[in-house]
Amino acid sequence: MKSIKNIYRTVCLTGLLALGTSSCTDWLTIYPQDRVVEENFWEDKNDLEGVRYGAYRQMARTVSKLVVWGDLRSDSYAVNSVEHSAQGNRDTYIEIVNGMPDSSMDVFDWGGVYTTINYCNKVLQHGEEVLERDKQFTSGEWIQMHAEMTALRALNYFYLIRAFKDVPYTTKVINKDSEVESFPLTNQLAVLDSIILDCERVKGKARNRFSDKRDTKGMITNCAIYAMLADMYLWRASLHEGRHDKNTKDVIVINGEEVSYSIADDYNKAIEYAEASLKSLADQNIEEQRSAGLSSSSETVDYGLGSNYAMIKNNFEGAAQATVPQLEAQTAIFSSKNSRESIFELQYSLSDELSNTIVNSLYGFGNGTHLMVNKEAIAKLYNDNSITGTGDNGAMWDSRIWVGCQNKVSTSSDAATTQAQAGYYCMKYHFIPGRSLNMEGSMNSREIRSFTYTSSTFNNWIIYRMTDVMLIKAEALACLGNANLKAVKAICNAIHRRSYCNYRNPSKIPATDAMQDQEATKPGNVYGTAQTPKAGNNVTVTLSEGIMCVMNERQIELLGEGKRWFDLVRLAERCSYRTADPEDPREPGIPNGQTGMSAMVTQFLGTGGNQGLATTLINRFKNRYGLYSPIYYMEVKAANGAIEQNPVWNKSKYER
């Protein structure tokens, strides 16, 4: 099989599949423009593989939007006050961070995602005919490719329903203008049911791994499908919990038969598939080691959770004060790319002529449109409520802070650095392994004094990785009740411990072989406290100790990875079942989610620089629809009534 590296560079689909990525006069631009006749194209396996790889390349082009949809409105960021060269983008980011997304912003144009979906649909439509024509193309290869493209299509729809809620849904190939139809909006849960069923049908039928590591990590494998199913079931359980009593049974038709399931069933499915994904990843790593003639890695540690949870170890032990921390885990995951913890990440490189510009647009402190990290929101995750404190359990001992919430240092000689405003920045995509951190100060105040800034536009973008899936499992466990609290904390503590370094008092570090019995000496996140934020209708919503544990650990572990806003939306949806809430404007008989939305905003979005914003946001968001993005106004305009704008964002600035 050709390496994805070579295919990304050589795939030639410009004439045949020059799919539009922005809207024009037609509402859903997922069709080729300037296309040639396809009848003579689908002849052999190479034709099919060209479109297959084109789907991955197209998804890689949409990452800049996926990140904004999944992260930018969260509590993790504030906008740098310095005006930059890309001032227009920065102004858009300011409005979004301040809770004022507008349908005129082209960042909400979903055309590029539907283009990826159309690539997948083309492969799925033409695969059987290629199988008939090309005798070198085996049925086994087609089964694997079919599973891969089905799951990739499902993943892109999953992004759409998390970002926009109700979206047009079709599995039909669009080839030319005359085939474009005004597909109406399909309810979020109906789309979710469909893509879950799709993934259930193809689970275990994709490749376990490819001969090339970059393909294994850069393409859909069974490991990735299991991770997607875990995530999707967690979302479906949360959406139903916010609409129905927990004991309510729902019904879905599978192969013509009605199948009944409950919210608890879905949470258990999330746990089951998270475990399956982690097992598949462990098997991947073992097979790779064997094929390379290597013994098992000694540079991993599972902190008492079992071999399927073995994470890359940061070797802090015995380091002197002046030693530059190597940060092996961060280096392998973000700098070296395609680590043993990676499940699916989109590939970028200079040789492919495909760049990931969003890394420099949002993160780092060069002259761009980047974001500052909301220091206060991150600091509240730690016992001393400080990023630079001296307490035994402070953030100063969490190495993820060193590269994820980096203080801009005014003494730096780097020109790109000195152009930035003083503040805290996410640098996890920009540090140079082994020499980027100059750690100075006393043993009681170990801080970064300088940072070598490296601008890169070829960072891979991780969709799923090991600790993300571990925390999906932990969240599902927490949602099933306090009986699982010990298991939830064991997972979160293990992830935290991997990046935790206390030179001053090593006794505060839990033993690696007794994590589940070491809650009293956990590294120090303050996630062990249930929260009761006030919400609408004089109601308070209790966020359990386990839920807070997971939410806080996900915030710091996955900072800057396009996850946080989606996490907050899922939490708000889960907390939304209150009969006192008004009726949903589009779902008769269902509460509109006002309570859950208010609880989430009150608990999380009123921190630090956003402190005075919570009341404004509650009034602006109104109900669950405020959690989702406005639909790009050109799509609504061209749909001739088939698409209704999100009712909270029903006007664009062009219409006011």
Image (tube, rainbow, N blue to C red):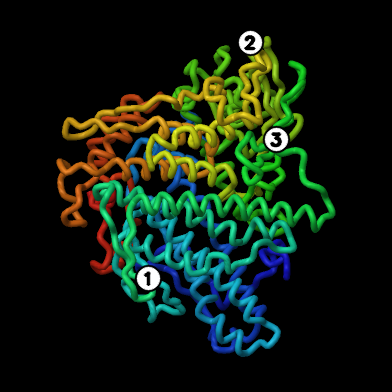
Mark toward the viewer: 3 or 2:
3
SS at badge 3: loop
Rounded to the nearest angstrom, the CA distance separating label 3 from label 1 is 43 Å
Query: Of residues 636 and 620, which is closer to you in this image?
Result: 620
Q: Is residue 602 left or right of residue 495?
A: left
How far across and down, in percent of the image, does residue 515 sit?
59, 30
Mark toward the viewer: 2 or 1:
1
Mark toward the viewer: 3 or 1:
1
> Tag on residue 59?
none
Q: How many other residues sit within 10 Å of disc 1, few (<14), some (14-19) or many (≥20)?
A: few
Asked if one can make out residue 629 in the rendered structure from this viewpoint, the answer is no
**Which is nearer the N-term, disc 3 or disc 1?**
1
Tell me what residue is drawn at x 28 percent, y 56 percent.
249
> Tag on residue 444?
2
Q: Where does label 3 land, which residue?
A: 313
What residue type is disc 2 on?
Answer: Asn
How far across and down, in percent of the image, does residue 608 sit?
40, 24
SS at badge 2: loop
How far across and down, in percent of the image, does residue 639 sit?
29, 67
Q: Are marks 3 and 1 in contact (CB under 8 Å)?
A: no
What residue type is disc 3 on?
Answer: Lys
Q: How many other residues sit within 10 Å of disc 3, few (<14), some (14-19) or many (≥20)?
A: some
> Tag on residue 254?
1
